[in-house]
């Protein structure tokens, strides 16, 4: 069943971290979840050309930190930080100015060819430009393997090539141990909007095994006791 499990959710707390980090009373959850969605939508609509892989949001009291991961940091920083200031002002307006301190940190992706989300977005954009989906898939896989990936899987689904009936097609190069928790697997999804309909693009990139992470302790009340329950021998 590993292929039906999101690689991030499967590894949360082990290899992957949460992309939204905040603690509030339960009745405030809907408002903050909606706000997180609007913040990410803001970057998607206004800076789609900047190759943004992900946006992490962190809240502590009246302070909010936003970390933006991009392949082109210069596009988001701007000349002398002008674009960052523009982003900050837009987010303050979006959130109603309720945060006394709102920080935007731009972080560069050193190996964009090993980022699954960027790979999915680039394949989707090529399909929208009427490039052959097979060519776009194989090109992304080649770049990832050339950059050091241990395995790459790409799946596209929809009316491929304008076919009457929707179908899915995938390619795999190398290994893809989806059910192994220590495997560092990146996952990305994007959509290509064509005149025939929407085509979904899924990308998995296996970067190798991680062995230096701390194993999670069992939950309280579920510790396994090493004491013997048998009768003492005197």
Image (cartoon, rainbow, N blue to C red):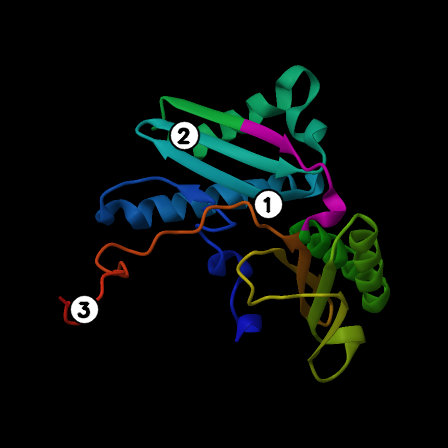
Per the rendered image, the range of residues in magenta is 105-115
The residue under label 1 is: 44
Tell me whether the residue at label 1 lies in contact with that at label 2, contact meaning CB atoms closer than 8 angstroms. no
The residue under label 3 is: 229
First-in-chain label (1 vs 2): 1
Q: Can residue 130 be seen from the camera position used here? A: no
Q: CA distance from mark 3 to mark 2?
A: 52 Å
User: Which is more foreground, mark 3 or mark 2?
Assistant: 3
First-in-chain label (3 vs 1): 1
**Which residue sits at x=71%, y=27%?**
74
| Image quadrant in which you'd find residue 212 | top right
Element under label 3?
loop
Vertically, is 59 above or below 34?
above
Q: CA distance from mark 1 to mark 2?
A: 19 Å
Residue 179 lies in the magenta stretch: no
Q: Position of residue 194 (x, y in %)?
A: 73, 65
Element under label 1?
helix
**Which residue sits at x=46%, y=48%?**
37
The residue under label 2 is: 64
Q: Position of residue 45 (x, y in %)?
A: 60, 44
Quadrant of the snapshot with the C terminus: bottom left
Tell me whether the residue at label 3 lies in contact with that at label 1, contact meaning CB atoms closer than 8 angstroms. no
Q: Position of residue 189 (x, y in %)?
A: 62, 59
Element under label 2?
strand
- Apparent side of residue 113 relative to residue 42 in the rendered image (left or right): right
Q: CA distance from mark 3 to mark 1?
A: 59 Å
Q: Can residue 150 be seen from the camera position used here? A: yes
Q: Residue furthest top?
A: 80
Q: Position of residue 134 (x, y in %)?
A: 83, 68
Few, some or many C-alpha atoms within 10 Å of disc 3 (few <14, some 14-19, many ≥20)? Answer: few
Q: Residue furthest front?
A: 234
């Amino acid at each position: 069943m590993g292929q039906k499990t999101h690689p991030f959710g499967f590894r949360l707390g082990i290899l992957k971290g949460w992309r939204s980090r905040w603690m509030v009373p339960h009745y405030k959850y809907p408002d903050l979840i909606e706000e997180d969605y609007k913040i990410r939508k803001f970057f998607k609509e206004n800076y789609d050309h900047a190759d943004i892989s992900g946006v992490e949001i962190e809240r502590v009291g009246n302070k909010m930190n936003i970390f933006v991961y991009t392949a082109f940091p210069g596009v988001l920083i701007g000349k002398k930080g002008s674009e960052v200031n523009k982003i900050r002002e837009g987010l303050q307006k979006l959130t109603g100015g309720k945060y006394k301190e709102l920080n935007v940190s731009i972080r560069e992706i050193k190996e964009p060819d090993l980022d699954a989300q960027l790979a999915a977005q680039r394949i989707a954009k090529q399909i929208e430009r009427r490039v052959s989906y097979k060519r776009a898939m194989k090109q992304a896989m080649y770049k990832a393997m050339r950059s050091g990936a241990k395995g790459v899987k790409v799946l596209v689904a929809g009316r491929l090539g304008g076919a009457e009936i929707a179908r899915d097609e995938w390619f795999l190069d190398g290994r893809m141990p989806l059910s192994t928790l220590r495997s560092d697997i990146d996952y990305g999804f994007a959509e290509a909007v064509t005149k025939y309909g929407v085509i979904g693009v899924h990308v998995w990139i296996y970067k190798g095994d991680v062995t230096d992470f701390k194993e999670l302790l069992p939950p309280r009340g579920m510790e396994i006791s090493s004491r013997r329950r048998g009768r003492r021998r005197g």
